[in-house]
Amino acid sequence: MATFFASCPIGLSDLVEAELKSFGLKTFEKTVGGVMFDSNWEGCYYANLHSRYSSRILKPLLDFHAYDGDEVYYNIRKHEFTKYVNPDQTVAVDAQIKECKMRDQRFLAMRVKDAIVDQFREKFAERPDVDSKNPDLRIHIKGYKNKFIVSLDTSGQSLFMRGYRSMTGEAPLKENLAAGLIGLSNWDCKKPLVDLFCGSGTILIEAAMMAAKMAPGIHRESFGFMKLKDFKSDVWEKVITEAESKELESIETEIHGFDFDKKVLQFAIQNAKNAGVSKFIKFKNTPISIAQAPTEQAGVVITNPPYGTRIGDEDNLKDVYRDLGYSLKNKFLGWDAWILSGNKDLLSEMKLKSTNKVYLMNGNIECRLLKYEMYAGSKRAPREISKNILNDFQVSAN
Ligand SMILES: C[S@@+](CC[C@H](N)C(=O)[O-])C[C@H]1O[C@@H](n2cnc3c(N)ncnc32)[C@H](O)[C@@H]1O
């Protein structure tokens, strides 16, 4: 048994805790940044493959107080790093510091790397090379108020990198955050689900993978733990075979994506193909001004409209949000809508009252995920459809 830490974007640690428990893992401490759990290596492999919301599964190795590079070096030397990889493999160190006497993250990473490679040199007369992009052993060191925690990264590349997204439009959501929006909405994998601004399709692909019981990491080529000396390939085989056997061939759920950009819809279609879920999703080239519910059964809208920080400019976006408010109110009666936006002024243009609010970080942008319930009978007076409605709009994505 060992202790692991599942890190995640701010706002998702409740979901991570619940999913780790559903995997049968024993969680014991939760912070905004993630959840601690106890497990053997099988549980660690399982969490890496199945966690939809985590960013990484880290294995904390040591913690200490330090005020300069020599103290860091001395403390790192106390742990035996040569047991993880061979000297002909590669290493990298990621360092983060907040409110510490040491301020230079690159210097900190260098001192940790020096301490690790010196251990190898002394033991084998050989040292591992540094590969910052794709190392065999990635070590994280985080310092806060002069206390440092050193962890081994069992994930390798971050878990949001599922391996299915070959093309994206502007401002795509990270896959684990997209899954998080779905998790926070409590979608039951049965009701129809629509993304009105689907871009490269991330929310829809994550939803389809959930409905088809497809493990989120099933398309990844590798995880960090596979490069470690004590990787148990038979245990991994068991974990992956069991995951594959649980995938559903078909689903009843209706999943629909709209966007007014034909090119980005082609990316979404390709990404859905890569993920093996294109047969479960219908994409349609539709501007928000003429969007309407694609099914008679009421369902859930989960969407991430543009909000100005990265795409578009705020004045034009006001029309987009007004159209969104109008479409939801008049064309999605009985539906629940969850809207993620980093701009609360634009959200107010929808002229709808939210019934739930969750704060989330989308990269370094503080966002709100707001819930709107479209009760039948509260129809708003029709408004003049804004000028961005296309006169001879063509529908052709699928
Ligand atoms: C923030 S991006 C969505 C990103 C998406 N969640 C992803 O992960 O790729 C917003 C999307 O809204 C689309 N969009 C902007 N204005 C629109 C409008 N008036 N009608 C429909 N789609 C629009 C853009 O083409 C863009 O793909």
Image: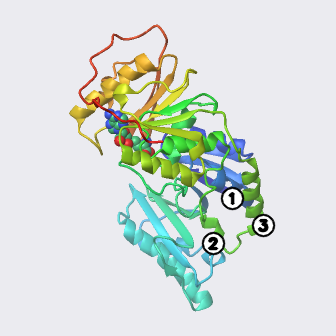
Q: Label 2 sits on what residue type? A: Lys
Which percent across, then down, holds residue 133? 46, 70
Q: Residues within 10 Å of mark 3 (few under 14, many from 20)?
A: few
Q: Earlier in the sequence, mark 2 or mark 3?
A: 2
Q: Label 1 sits on what residue type? A: Tyr
Disc 3 within 8 angstroms of ligand 1 (CB): no
Residue 398 against residue 226 in the figure, above or below: above
CA gap, disc 1 to disc 2? 13 Å
Residue 280 against residue 192 in the figure, above or below: below
Residue 336 against residue 31 in the figure, above or below: above
Quadrant in which the N terminus is drawn: bottom right
Residue closer to the observer: 142 or 101: 142
In what element is the residue under mark 1? helix
Q: Earlier in the sequence, mark 1 or mark 3?
A: 1
Which percent across, then down, holds residue 264? 39, 47
Q: Label 3 sits on what residue type? A: Asp
Is 375 left, or right, of 249 in this rendering? left
Instruction: Name the disc covering residue 242, or none.
Output: none
The image quadrant of residue 116 is bottom right
The image quadrant of residue 17 is top right
Which percent across, then down, holds residue 125? 58, 92
**Which residue is at 56% across, 76% downward?**
77
Q: Give the residue number, with chain letter if any, for mark 1.
A: 45
Q: Earlier in the sequence, mark 1 or mark 2?
A: 1
Disc 2 within 8 angstroms of ligand 1 (CB): no
Number of marks in the rendered image: 3
